[in-house]
Image: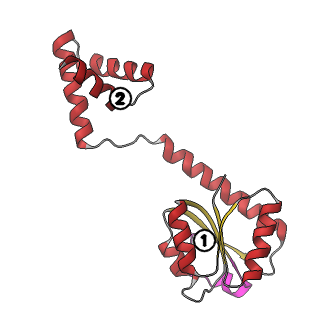
C-alpha cells in the first residue's frame, strides 16, 4: 500500500480529498496544513505520494517539491493558470475544479509508477562495504587454501551455503571464518 499525504492550507479541502481516497480503498497516512508538516510526515514515511495545493502559509509547492525525500511523487492540485505556468518539470498536476475520477485515476497511475520504481531499485544488487568485501575475500582465501579450490569454486561454495542457510553471503563468510580460523 502506498503512503499518501494530503496537504492543503484549508481544512475542508484536506477532509474532502481524504474522504474520497478512503472511500476508494486508499490509506491516507497524514493530513497536513503547512509545508513544514508535510515535509515532517514525508521524512517519517520515506516514500509515497503527496497530494498538495499550490501555496501554503510557510512555503510554495516548489519548495516543498525541492525538499521532499527521494522516493516521493507530488500531485499538485491548482488552478488551470497555475498548472500551466508551473516551474517544476517532473510534476503531475490536476486543474481545479477537481473531478473525483481524475483524482483516482491519477493516484492509481502514480502508485503504479512508484511500484515499478521500487521493484527496479530492489532488483539492483546492494553495494558491499569495503569491510564486507575484505571479509568475503578472506573467507574465499581460507577455503582456497584449506580445500584446494579455485576462487570461482570458493565463491560458488559461499553462495550455495548462504542460499541453503537463508543467510546473506557476508554472514556465511563470517560463519566460515569463525569455524575454520
Using the image as rendered, state which of residue 174 and residue 118 is in the foreground: 174
Q: Where's residue 150, x and y in %?
A: 23, 16
Query: Is residue 79 a member of the stretch shown in magenta?
Result: yes
The local secondary structure at tag 1 comes to: loop
The quadrant of the rendering that contains the C terminus is top left
For this orientation, the residue located farthest to the front is 178
Answer with mark 2 or mark 1, whichever residue precedes in sequence. Answer: 1
Q: Quadrant of residue 13?
A: bottom right
Task: Please tell me whether mark 2 or mark 1 is closer to you in this view.
Answer: 2
Asked if residue 95 shows in the view, the reply is no
Name which residue lies at 52% across and 71% down: 40
Q: Residue at x 67, y 52 (%)?
A: 1
| Up-down relation of residue 42 to residue 9 (above or below) | above
Instruction: Name the residue located 57 percent from the left edge and 74 percent from the top edge.
Output: 38
Circle on res. 91: 1
Local crowd size for mark 1, using a 10 Å CA cut-off: few (<14), some (14–19), many (≥20): some
> Depth check: 76 or 8 in front?
8
Secondary structure category for the residue under label 2: helix
Residue on which the image places disc 2: 169
Above or below for 7 versus 135: below
Picture quadrant of residue 20: bottom right
Residue 135 appears in the figure: yes
Q: Is residue 39 above or below residue 174?
A: below
Q: Residues within 10 Å of mark 2 (few under 14, many from 20)?
A: some
Report the residue that reaches farthest toward the bottom: 57
| Residue at figure coordinates x 50%, y 43% from the top left | 122
Q: Which residues are magenta?
A: 77-90
Is residue 2 a member of the stretch shown in magenta?
no
Residue 56 got which mark? none
List x then y, in percent, for residue 170: 32, 32
Q: Choose between 10 and 142: the one closer to the eye.
A: 10
When the figure is inspected, residue 109 is found, relative to residue 97, above or below; the finding is: above
Amino acid at each position: 500500500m502506498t503512503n499518501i499525504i494530503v496537504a492543503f492550507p484549508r481544512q475542508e479541502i484536506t477532509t474532502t480529498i481524504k474522504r474520497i481516497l478512503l472511500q476508494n480503498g486508499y490509506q491516507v497516512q497524514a493530513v497536513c496544513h503547512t509545508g513544514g508538516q508535510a515535509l515532517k510526515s514525508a521524512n517519517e514515511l520515506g516514500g509515497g505520494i503527496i497530494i498538495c495545493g499550490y501555496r501554503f502559509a510557510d512555503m510554495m509547492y516548489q519548495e516543498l517539491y525541492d525538499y521532499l525525500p527521494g522516493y516521493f511523487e507530488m500531485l499538485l492540485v491548482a488552478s488551470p493558470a497555475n498548472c500551466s505556468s508551473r516551474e517544476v518539470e517532473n510534476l503531475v498536476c490536476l486543474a481545479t475544479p477537481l473531478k473525483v475520477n481524475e483524482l483516482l485515476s491519477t493516484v492509481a497511475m502514480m502508485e503504479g509508477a512508484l511500484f515499478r520504481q521500487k521493484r527496479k531499485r530492489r532488483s539492483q544488487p546492494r553495494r558491499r562495504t569495503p569491510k564486507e568485501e575484505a571479509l568475503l575475500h578472506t573467507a574465499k582465501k581460507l577455503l582456497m587454501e584449506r580445500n584446494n579450490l579455485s576462487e570461482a569454486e570458493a565463491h560458488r561454495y559461499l553462495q550455495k551455503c548462504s542460499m541453503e542457510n537463508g543467510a546473506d553471503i557476508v554472514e556465511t563468510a563470517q560463519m566460515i571464518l569463525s569455524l575454520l580460523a
